[in-house]
Image (spheres, grey):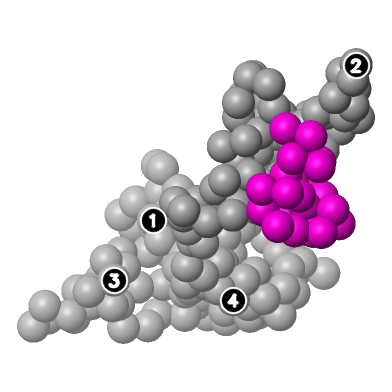
Amino acid sequence: MTNLTETQTIILSAGAQRPDNIALPLPKGLAGAAAKMAVTKMIERGWLQEVDANLRKGEPLWRETGDGHGTTLVVTDAGLLAIRIEPVVVKTVVAMRQHVAKTPVAKPPTQRAGTKQAMVIAMLQRPEGATMAEIVAAAEWQAHSARGAMSGALGKKLGLVVKSAKEGERGRVYRIDNSEGIVGSMSE
């Protein structure tokens, strides 16, 4: 088992959580000769590696090498193992973060005017609501298609809450419930 100082543990742990395992910035209070000594020991043990800094990405500099170039410090696989983190786990987490960052945000579905779906929504938004028979007749759909549209397209895709209630001679009447701001589905 590797004996690490508290400072070494902090540097390696912080670097393991940063993109590309960059070990900088060093902990507060660690500067000058003490920082150089700590980093030198960690490089000798293979826990840190000095690599060219990508200034375009804004990577922090450990030291300048001239001509506008410099180096930064990266936690190595040996450094990750020293703090009992499997390098493959870190690489997997980084890959997942990059994938999430690249994944485009899906735009919410929009309602097109003049469609049967828009007509059904308008019927359900009326104060008197609409019965299944009225929806089937107006949209020229089968009853199962009307129920599917209310549950799937209106409820799940558009996030509208469709409620139903039995009302005397009309039977079951469906309405869009505008009082709730949550996604819902047909309820009895």
In the image, is residue 134 above or below residue 97? Answer: above
Q: Is residue 155 above or below residue 178?
A: below
Q: Residue at x 66, y 33 (%)?
A: 124
Mark sitting earlier along the chain (1/4): 1
The CA span between labels 4 and 3 is 18 Å
Q: Which residue is mark 3?
A: 57
- Give the percent coordinates (x, y) of residue 162: 74, 34
Residue interval drawn in magenta: 130-152
| Amino acid at dot 3 | Lys
Number of labels in the image equals 4
Tell me the kind of residue under disc 4.
Ala
Q: Nearer the viewer, mark 1 or mark 2?
A: 2
Quarter of the image that includes the C terminus: top right
Q: Earlier in the sequence, mark 2 or mark 3?
A: 3
Residue 32, picture quadrant? bottom left
- What amino acid is labelled 2 in the image? Gly
Observer-nearest of 53 and 104 = 104
Q: Which mark is residue 168?
A: 2
Between tags 1 and 4, which lies in front? Answer: 4
Q: Nearer the viewer, mark 2 or mark 4?
A: 2
- Distance, label 1 to label 4, CA atoms, is 23 Å
Which residue type carries mark 1? Pro
Query: Please, what secondary structure does the residue beneath circle 3 have?
Result: helix
Above/below status of 90 relative to 173: below
Label placed on residue 42: none
The residue identified by callout 4 is 95
Q: Position of residue 66 (x, y in %)?
A: 12, 81
Magenta stretch: dominant secondary structure: helix
Residue indicated by mark 1 = 25
| Disc nearer the start of the sequence (1/2) | 1
Tell which of 183 and 101 is nearer to you.
183
